[in-house]
Amino acid sequence: MNSSMVIGQYVPGKSIVHELDPRTKISIIFFFVIIVFFANSFMSYLLLTLFAVGSVFITRIPLSFIVKGLKPVWFIIIFTFFLHVFMTKEGNILFTIFSYPIYSGALIQGISISLRFFLLILVTSMLTLTTTPISITDAIESLLDPLKKLRFPVHELALMMSISLRFIPTLMQETEKISKAQASRGVDFRSGPIKERMKAIVPLLVPLFVSAFKRAEELAMAMEARGYQGGEGRTKLRELVLTKKDYYVIAFFILVITGVFLTRQ
C-alpha cells in the first residue's frame, strides 16, 4: 500500500464497510457532508467524530496508513485553523501572542472549521479505500438513473468521476517520482525566495502534464481497443443488491443524524 495519499486508493478487505453496497456508502457520505455543517455544539461534533473515527476502525485498515495518507491535507487543516484564530475577532480576549490578541470566538471557530474539514476528508476517503472504482461507477450510475429519462449522460459522468478518483494516487506518485528526479539534478523546491521556488516548480509541472496526457491517451486507446461505446446497451457482471447490513447501517446513521439535530444549540 502506498501511504503518500489515501484519496483514490482501494485497499482490499473483508470488513463490514467493504461489504456494504456502494450506493449505501455514497448516500451516507453525501448526507454526512451536509449534516457536518449543521453541527454547532460540543455534543454534535462529538457524535460526528465518533461516527467518522469508528468507521475507520471498522474498516480494519491500519490507522498509521490513513494518517500518513492524509499528510498532504494536514497543512491545509492547520493553515485554516490559524487563519481563523488570527483573523476572527469575536468573544473575549484569552491571551496574546507577540502582542496580538487571541479571542475566544476565534479559537472556537478555528477548531470547528478545521474539525469539519478533517471529518469531511476522513469520511470521503473511506469510500475509495473500501470500494473498487468499478463499484463506485455502478453505484453512481444507479443513483443517477432517473436522469437518463432526460437524456443525461449518466454512465459517462459516473465513469469520468471514477477514473478521476482512480488517477489521484497515480498522479501523486508521479509527482513524487519527478520531484525526486529533479532534486537529484540540483533543483531546490524548499528553500530560497518565493520567486525562485515558483521557477523551480516549472521543471516539475511540465513532465507531470506530459505524463498525465500520455496516460489519458493510453487509457482512451485501451478502451477503444476493447470496444467501449458508452453506456448504451451495456450489461453488468455484478448487480447491486441491498442487504440487511445496509439497512442496519442506514438506520444507525439516521440515529446519528437525529442525535446531531437534538444536540444543536
Image (spheres, rainbow, N blue to C red):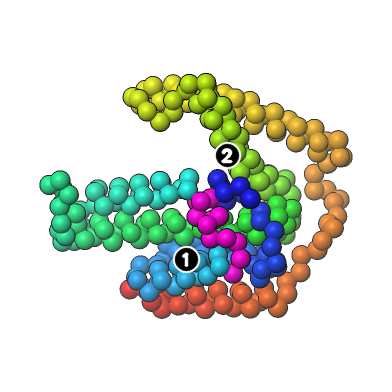
Q: Residues within 10 Å of mark 2 (few under 14, many from 20)?
A: some
**Magenta highlight: main SS:** helix
Instruction: Report if residue 195 is visible in the image.
Output: yes
Q: Where is residue 105 shown, x and y percent of the image?
A: 23, 60
Instruction: Report if residue 141 is visible in the image.
Output: no
Type of amino acid under label 1 = Ile
Which residue range is magenta in the image?
Answer: 58-70
Q: Earlier in the sequence, mark 1 or mark 2?
A: 1
Drawn side of residue 100 relative to residue 118, left or right: left
Looking at the image, is 214 positioned above or below residue 52?
A: above
Image quarter of residue 138: bottom right
Considering the numbered disc 2 on the image, is that residue within a helix, a strand or a loop?
helix
Residue located 60% across and 25% down the image: 207
The disc at residue 172 is: 2
Kindly identify which residue carries mark 1. Answer: 35
Q: Residues within 10 Å of mark 1 (few under 14, many from 20)?
A: some
Of residues 39 and 3, which is closer to you in this image?
3
* Whole-number angstrom distance, CA of label 1 to CA of label 2: 30 Å
Q: Where is residue 245 shown, x and y percent of the image?
A: 68, 76
